[in-house]
Image (cartoon, grey):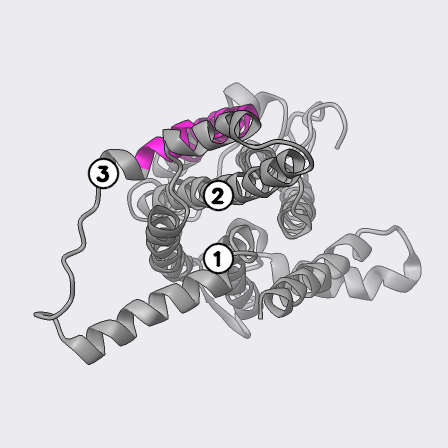
Amino acid sequence: MELGLVTLLRAAWIAVTLPIVIAPIPSSKLSSFHQLVSKFAKRGKTMQPCSCKFTVPHRFFSHVYMVAVVWTTILLLTTWLYAYRMAPLTSESFHILHLASHLTGGSHILSFHKSHLTALEHRYSIWRIVLLLLLMEAQVLRRLFETFNVSNYSPSARMHIFGYLTGLFYYIAAPLSLCCTLAPKVFNFTLSLVAEFIVKGKNQMPAIEIDWCGSVNPLMKLGWSQWIGSAIFLWGWIYQCRCHASLGSVQAHAEQVDDYVIPTGDWFEIVSSPHYLAEIVIYAGMVVASGGGDLTVWLLFVFVVANLGFAAAETHKWYLCKFENYPRNRFAIIPFLY
């Protein structure tokens, strides 16, 4: 089941990334394909008001973030409980390795050391997944908050239904991709707890005692790559928050509801879509925090870069067409490159 889920997710990320990568290729044979992908990707200001067929209001994207918060929270809590019960990281874990070299001899030293080292590394990998889900939770919670309190959706702003469904797919598959190697075990563990509760009933169930300090301390024992990745994530997280606040403020001060003005200040002086650039930084932090050894996380990151790069290019074109005085020295998303 574990390999099946991992393979399915990897195939899904490749399948949704390839069209986005192929569409921008400058070829007359692909022009119609580019228009099709662009039509599916357009939303808000980049979608023509007359293009209302198979569309939904842009504000409906809040549904996507609601699903994202519920789904990520379920994955986080069940994985955290599994890690707490099945993979504790205590000081004894380190003493075992130290005592092994003194209490055993001969050919048994290497095998004993290897077995405990492997078990300890497996525990660390479980807590790395908890950290990744914790970072994802911080991201989707903030996006849900911004949807209701920061973003100012125009009443006429719409998005293609395919883009709406793609958003639902993304926020179900992305958190699952962060924990796909562990998800089947967590599922069976949770299922056994539910089955035990059904059979024994509430009164017969043993009391669940959680050492809150013990459930957080393992996260403090993770390696430098997790700390560096979390720092990169936090940097991108804060900057995206600032970018969204700037965009919300610009729209709030527009003279008419459907008017748009040129955003200025901070990263907006360099690129047209700094909020997309910040999101790439956010997921780059997740890749670093994961240790960089999980292909599924890498494929998720490649999709994020391809998708946001394509969306930023379309937004940049819209700005250039909409405003004659739009700064020509701005790039779409990557400063001085693209």
Is any part of residue 276 visible from this angle?
A: no
Marks 3 and 2, the one that precedes in the sequence:
2
Marks 1 and 3: which is nearer the front? 3
Q: Residue at x 11, y 70 (%)?
A: 204
Amino acid type at circle 3 is Trp
> Do tag 3 and tag 2 residues touch (Cβ < 8 Å)?
no
Q: Residues within 10 Å of mark 2 (few under 14, many from 20)?
A: some
The residue pinned by badge 2 equals 123
x and y, in percent, of residue 64 in the image? 42, 60
Q: Residues within 10 Å of mark 3 (few under 14, many from 20)?
A: few
In this picture, residue 135 sits left or right of residue 15: left
Q: Residues within 10 Å of mark 1 (few under 14, many from 20)?
A: many
Amino acid type at circle 2 is Arg
Q: Magenta region, mostly helix, strand or loop?
A: helix
Tag of residue 212: 3
Marks 2 and 1, the one that precedes in the sequence:
2
11 within the magenta span: no
Tag of residue 171: 1
Amino acid type at circle 1 is Tyr
